[in-house]
């Protein structure tokens, strides 16, 4: 297989990975609210999502390094399908918690394994092949896929208006989630077809002590990588603040926009269109990220992009019409697209192949730690002080993290260049 074909397969898998989530993305918060949960309960539901990711993220990466990335990706895809099927019919807090727990488990299994499979496969074909192009296009493909999913999900909800059905179980939001479950099964088939790797020495039937020993070795290697690399430690610290900021946006934007739009029909398509536009904004930002990197350099470009996310997050709650909120929301996600490829490049260049999947998963764990805190606190803060205050706090935390960590990152990159 050529490096070009490998990169195309990776981009396709990145897209298919997020298409199922895109179908339900515009209504992740509105679905439980429509079925009787208040915003505080919704925050607890998504806190479960973050908690499961925290518990499984690094072990799942170690498992991928141990038994093979393909096996882990297949299980992750199957869990995603099951979770969205459950989300379609959930009516209680416990049912929604079970759904998002399965979704988080699938995400944890996929997150480190897919990127690590691509990077290691590419390095095997060409040890000096640049990573930026494939990672940037992969991020852009995710944005496009989620946008398409959001458009279709919004159309489904608009056609089957859940307000017209008494039980709401399969109307609108439920049908969108069922479509997401079907898309996850398509992704499972793509993984089975496109992911190829050499067999790992540890097999599934060896899962007991043999895997445990290997996992401990991987963890020790990953800890050594983090201890030896200031860049890794900086990225992990920024990931916490970034996870808090973006989770505050994700938790509050749907009820905030619903308040701005008021009562009325046809809002399902509006939510889908905005979610789609936000993902296209991520794709646009990711596509432009290499140019920003070349213009400003990796460190300055990365920190500048973080600053833009912080500013736009803090401004989201400014009083005004829905149009102003929409503009700021899209600018927030455009800036996120700038950040993601540079963030991934910094992390991948700072670690070795033996623990790459584990360290990538550890970065996601750090972001989910920030998300967990946001889900437990932002809803209550918004209820007490207003959504605008909650977003100002989130943006300020990210800005402070960027300022405090700018100097250590500069020293680390200068040392690496020397």
Image (cartoon, grey):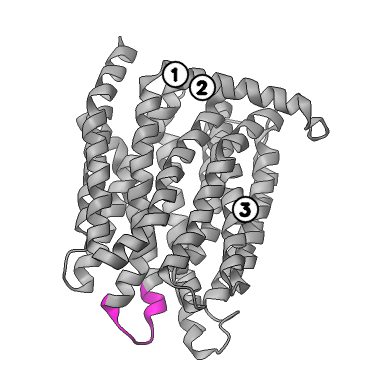
- Tell me, yes or no, whether the highlighted magenta stretch contains residue 263: yes
As measured in the structure, the alpha-carbon distance from the residue carrying label 2 to the one carrying label 1 is: 6 Å
**Which of the two labelled residues, at mark 2 and mark 3, occupies the earlier sequence position?**
3
Q: Position of residue 7 (x, y in %)?
A: 52, 37
Q: Is residue 90 left or right of residue 204?
A: left
Regarding residue 354, the answer to whether it shows in the image is no
Residue highlighted by disc 1 = 227
Q: Position of residue 112 (x, y in %)?
A: 55, 37
Region rendered in magenta: 260-270
Q: Position of residue 72 (x, y in %)?
A: 67, 41
Task: Determine which quarter of the picture holds residue 203.
Answer: top right
Looking at the image, which is closer to me, 280 or 414?
414
Residue highlighted by disc 2 = 223
Task: Determine which quarter of the picture holds residue 298.
Answer: top left
Residue 176, placed above or below residue 233: below
Tally the numbered discs: 3
Nearest to viewer (mark 1 / mark 3): 1
As measured in the structure, the alpha-carbon distance from the residue carrying label 1 to the one carrying label 3 is: 36 Å
Callout 3: SS? helix
Nearest to viewer (mark 2 / mark 3): 2
Callout 1: SS? helix
Residue 315, placed above or below residue 269: above
Residue highlighted by disc 3 = 187
Task: Determine which quarter of the picture holds residue 198.
Answer: top right
Callout 2: SS? helix
Q: Residues within 10 Å of mark 2 (few under 14, many from 20)?
A: some
- Tell me, yes or no, whether the highlighted magenta stretch contains residue 300: no
Residue located at (25% from left, 54% from top):
313
């Amino acid at each position: 297989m050529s490096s070009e074909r490998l990169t195309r397969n990776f981009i396709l898998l990145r897209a298919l990975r997020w298409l199922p989530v895109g179908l339900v993305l515009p209504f992740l918060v509105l679905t439980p609210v429509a079925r009787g949960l208040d915003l505080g309960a919704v925050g607890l539901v998504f806190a479960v999502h973050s908690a499961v990711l925290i518990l499984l993220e690094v072990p799942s990466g170690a498992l991928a390094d141990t038994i093979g990335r393909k096996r882990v990706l297949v299980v992750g895809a199957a869990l995603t399908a099951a979770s969205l099927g459950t989300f379609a019919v959930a009516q209680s807090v416990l049912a929604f918690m079970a759904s998002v727990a399965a979704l988080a488990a699938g995400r944890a299994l996929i997150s480190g394994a897919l990127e690590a499979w691509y990077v290691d496969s590419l390095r095997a074909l060409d040890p000096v092949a640049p990573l930026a192009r494939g990672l940037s296009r992969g991020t852009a493909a995710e944005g496009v896929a989620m946008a398409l999913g959001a458009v279709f999900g919004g159309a489904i909800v608009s056609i089957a208006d859940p307000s017209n059905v008494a039980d709401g179980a399969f109307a609108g939001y439920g049908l969108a989630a069922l479509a997401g479950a079907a898309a996850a099964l398509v992704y499972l088939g793509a993984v089975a077809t496109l992911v190829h790797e050499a067999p790992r020495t540890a097999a599934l039937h060896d899962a007991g002590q043999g895997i445990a020993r290997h996992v401990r070795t991987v963890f020790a290697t990953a800890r050594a990588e983090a201890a030896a690399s200031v860049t890794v430690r900086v990225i992990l610290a920024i990931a916490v603040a970034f996870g808090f900021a973006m989770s505050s946006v994700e938790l509050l934007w749907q009820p905030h926009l619903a308040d701005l739009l008021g009562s009325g029909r046809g809002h399902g398509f509006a939510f889908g269109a905005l979610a789609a536009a936000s993902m296209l904004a991520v794709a646009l930002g990711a596509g432009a990220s290499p140019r920003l990197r070349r213009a400003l350099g990796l460190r300055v470009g990365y920190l500048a992009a973080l600053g833009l996310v912080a500013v736009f997050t803090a401004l989201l709650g400014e009083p005004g019409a829905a149009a102003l909120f929409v503009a700021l929301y899209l600018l927030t996600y455009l800036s996120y697209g700038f950040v993601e490829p540079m963030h991934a490049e910094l992390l991948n260049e700072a670690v070795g192949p033996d623990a790459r999947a584990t360290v990538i998963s550890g970065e996601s764990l750090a972001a989910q730690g920030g998300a967990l805190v946001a889900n437990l606190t932002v809803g209550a803060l918004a209820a007490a002080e207003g959504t605008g205050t909650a977003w100002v706090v989130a943006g300020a935390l990210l800005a402070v993290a960027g300022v405090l960590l700018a100097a250590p990152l500069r020293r680390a990159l200068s040392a690496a260049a020397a």
